[in-house]
């Protein structure tokens, strides 16, 4: 147990960190204790059920064979506190559920900006990390004794769990972190630190009896409240899934070519979500509702140029063209038939096979 003096010093440093987080451009900042939260107890069972799909990095294990993400105390025994920061990326553009032109694809809202969010958030975290070290040094702690690690979707930690215990928001039934004031359009970044900081209270769950996200998911990826099967999630299918997408899921994917926002679009807590002030996340017009035929016939050179520094690069050119072909098959737009016919003989087998299935769906829609 900390002494009154140590507790007072921890509170003072915590206040400094929170002010600095806002000055760095974060919208929310909270502190969680670096203990194993009860939500992590379900992680091994989730992995064991195969719900992580092909995301093998989620299954990373330590030398004893235990899942790293299932125990922060095991992978970072030196950590005492988790600084959790959140930054809003919402924009004024309508939601995917409000667009109806099926000849155009949907790129997830978070990928519209001019810079990859990993870099934008990490830059701010490092600025905050520097202030944390200085504050501890000035309070009588030698900076050399302090251990910190900054992560943005890259560390052995389930960020949204610690965001809950840091008071950032609760974990919604769609498994996204939801802030009562900011909604769910949030990027998270964390700093693990060996410093004892003053923790915040966990955010209470305010989903209530609402099931809109579950009912709106076209692929039934939300098996039940708070439980997601990645294998059926459109975001996973369009970004992480390599090779062919199961044919039984293709029609339900609609016009999504990178990610999916539906479960957040229908969330009541996003009705009044504020618009971001971060310039890096201002939407590029060419990435909001792009033409499907443009994406499907994109060259490697154009892909590199258009998506330089963008999260869209994660799906790779083959995946993006595959997704665009599938979306064209779901469009009912007979004007896209010629493009699908051409793609059906593409040298990329993943694209050609997807185009052939899409061509058949398009033909059936004309009957």
Image (cartoon, grey):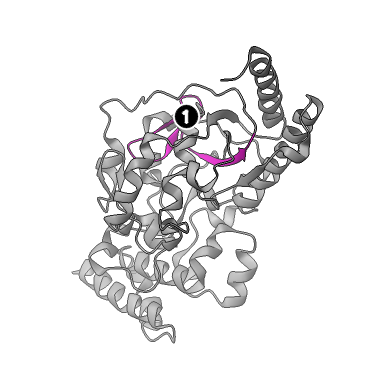
Give the vertical position of 171 relative to 50 (above or below).
above
Rendered location of residue 203, percent (x, y): 44, 24
User: In the image, 273: left or right of 29?
Assistant: left
Rendered location of residue 30, percent (x, y): 57, 28
Q: Is residue 182 magenta?
A: yes
For residue 282, say whether it is visible.
no
Rendered location of residue 208, percent (x, y): 29, 25
**Residue for point 36% across, 64% down:** 327
Rendered location of residue 262, percent (x, y): 37, 45
Q: Which residues are magenta?
A: 169-194
| Residue for badge 1 | 165
Nearest the viewer among 297 and 54 is 54
For residue 317, say whether it is visible.
yes
Residue 328, by quadrant, is bottom left
Nearest the viewer among 128 and 3 is 3
Q: Is residue 50 magenta?
A: no
**Residue with the most extreme left position:** 367
Give the vertical position of 206 relative to 142 (above or below).
above
**Residue for point 62% across, 28% down:** 196
**Residue for point 57% across, 77% down:** 300
Nearest the viewer among 230 and 261 is 230
Image quadrant containing the C terminus: bottom left
């Amino acid at each position: 147990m900390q002494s009154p003096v140590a507790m007072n010093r921890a509170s003072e440093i915590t206040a400094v960190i929170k002010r600095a987080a806002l000055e760095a451009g974060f919208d929310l900042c909270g502190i969680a204790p670096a203990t194993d939260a009860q939500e992590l107890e379900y992680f091994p069972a989730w992995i064991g059920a195969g719900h992580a799909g092909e995301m093998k990095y989620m299954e990373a294990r330590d030398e004893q064979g235990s899942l790293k993400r299932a125990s922060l105390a095991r992978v970072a025994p030196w950590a005492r506190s988790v600084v959790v920061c959140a930054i809003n990326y919402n924009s004024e553009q309508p939601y995917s559920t409000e667009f109806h032109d099926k000849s155009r694809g949907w790129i997830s809202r978070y990928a519209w900006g001019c810079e990859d969010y990993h870099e934008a958030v990490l830059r701010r975290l490092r600025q905050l990390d520097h202030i944390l070290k200085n504050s501890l040094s000035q309070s009588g702690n030698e900076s050399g004794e302090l251990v910190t690690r900054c992560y943005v979707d890259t560390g052995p930690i389930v960020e949204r769990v610690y965001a809950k215990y840091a008071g950032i928001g609760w974990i919604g039934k769609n498994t996204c972190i939801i802030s009562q004031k900011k909604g769910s359009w949030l990027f998270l970044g964390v700093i693990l630190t060996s410093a004892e900081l003053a923790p915040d209270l966990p955010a209470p769950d305010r989903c209530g009896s609402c099931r809109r996200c579950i009912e709106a998911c076209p692929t039934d990826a939300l098996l039940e409240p708070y439980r997601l099967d990645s294998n059926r999630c459109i975001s996973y299918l369009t970004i992480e899934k390599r090779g062919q997408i199961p044919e039984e899921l293709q029609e339900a994917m609609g016009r999504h070519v990178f990610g999916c926002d539906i479960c957040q679009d229908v969330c009541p807590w996003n009705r009044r979500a504020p618009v971001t002030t971060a310039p890096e996340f201002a939407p590029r017009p060419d990435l909001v509702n792009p033409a499907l035929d443009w994406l499907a016939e994109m060259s490697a050179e154009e892909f590199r140029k258009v998506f330089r520094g963008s999260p869209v690069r994660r799906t790779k050119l083959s995946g993006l063209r595959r997704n665009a072909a599938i979306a064209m098959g779901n469009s009912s737009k007979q004007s896209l038939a010629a493009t699908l016919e051409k793609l059906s003989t593409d040298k990329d087998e993943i694209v050609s096979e997807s185009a052939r299935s899409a061509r058949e769906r398009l033909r059936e829609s004309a009957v």
